[in-house]
Image (spheres, rainbow, N blue to C red):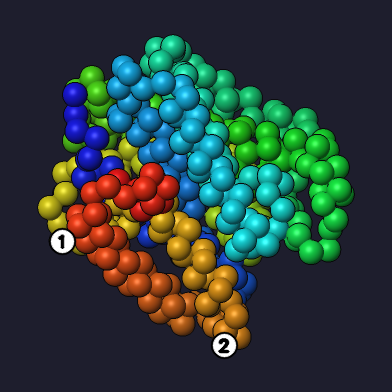
Amino acid sequence: MHSSRNLTIDILRGIAIFTMVAANLSASLLQPDDKVLIFRLYGTFAAPLFVMLAGMMVVITGTKHATFQHYLKRGLSIIVCGCLLDVLVWQIYPFLGYDILYLTGLSIPVVHLLSKYCTITTRTLIVILLIASTPALQTLFDYREELSSVEIAPLPFSDYLVLLLSEPTAQRFLLDGWFPLMPWLSVAITGSILGSLYRQGYSFASKRLLATGIALFCIGVALWLAQNPHLVIREGYSELFYPPTTGYLFTATGLIFIGFFCVETTQQLTLHSVFLKLGHASLFMYLFHQIVLVFILMPIEILNNQPLPTFLLTYLAVIAVMVAAGHLLASIKQKYKNLPFIVRFIIGS
């Protein structure tokens, strides 16, 4: 069996965080007119990489003794982090928009069950079914491009409960929230398939993986252009997956497969050390940059509505702080071997 600590996976997780930070900071700090296509593309593939790696790790780190309760506990812990982030940082009600932590937390026990009881072929068919049925469902139920958060202060809790149990909220969860199950669960399941192949001895440096990635990428780009989706900016967020089309999903999957091959064959590059520090504590880094954004950057008026050159300097400064934090966390983990579970969970074990 392969070791659970894989440099390629850690580097790719760090790359996901590195690019996701740009996308998240730009929603609040970058001038709307400067959200040019090339920049929007830059942050667009971080989320599927993050989700696919989460699905993959369920399989790679699993053992025959791992129980459903273990993965349920882990998934619920991530969902709790998402709730706390909504309530304490963004001061919005949870379980209404379904950010990426909700999707990741829900995916973990689901992927565990599928990887335990379904073959690779069956999971592949499930992925195809999810991706193929999503466009029809988006049309049938009228995919809503606009999505607004519900702040805690103006809305009484009783009204929130009514909203939580409403049909529009269910549609957000399933179809048109930030990261709805349809089709994003397919990305996590794809990760589990790649994880199963890896456990069977399949190498990330395989030319077959590279060829598959190139084929999926080319097909995806062609589909994406043919579908000509109306790409929107939601509350300042400019990723190109509102909605996540079939073309986008093929493109993202192909690009991620290519990324696995490229990173696996260039692990020793010095540049990757930056990504490793981010990837070793990815959950901490995700929470940390959101806290920095809300409590430090957004209150400084001069940092709001920045032109792209200035924004890039802010972005790189935040990354530098996060890499420094990564070095500090590495020292803490090396010095203290028996940290409480919640600490190890947040900073990575």
Above or below: residue 321 compared with residue 335 = below
Question: Which residue lies at the image location 75% right of the left edge and 45% below the top edge?
Answer: 144
Q: Quadrant location of residue 254?
A: top left
Tags 2 and 1 in contact by the CB under 8 Å rule? no
Q: Closest to the observer: 4 or 9?
A: 4
Q: CA distance from mark 2 to mark 1?
A: 35 Å
Q: Residues within 10 Å of mark 1 (few under 14, many from 20)?
A: few
Question: Which residue lies at the image location 83% right of the left edge and 63% below the top edge?
Answer: 154
Q: Residues within 10 Å of mark 2 (few under 14, many from 20)?
A: few
Question: Which residue lies at the image location 19% right of the left edge and 33% below the top edge?
Answer: 3
Locate the N terminus and report the quarter of the image it occupies.
Answer: top left
Residue ranking furthest to the bottom? 302
Amino acid type, callout 1: Thr
Helix, strand or loop at label 1? It is: loop
> Does residue 65 appear to the left or right of 189 in the view shown?
left
> Does residue 328 appear to the left or right of 343 in the view shown?
left
Per the rendering, the mark at residue 3 is none
- For disc 2, the marked residue is 302
Total marks shown come to: 2
Report x, y in % for residue 197. 28, 23
Amino acid type, callout 2: Ile
Q: Does label 2 or label 1 sit earlier along the sequence?
A: 1
- Residue 75 seen in the current view: yes
Above or below: residue 303 compared with residue 41 = below
- For disc 1, the marked residue is 270
Report x, y in % for residue 79. 56, 42
Above or below: residue 349 compared with residue 220 = below
Question: Which residue lies at the image location 57% right of the left edge and 25% below the top edge?
Answer: 130
Report x, y in % for residue 82. 57, 49
Helix, strand or loop at label 2? It is: helix
Q: Closest to the observer: 252 or 29?
A: 29
Report x, y in % for residue 133. 63, 25
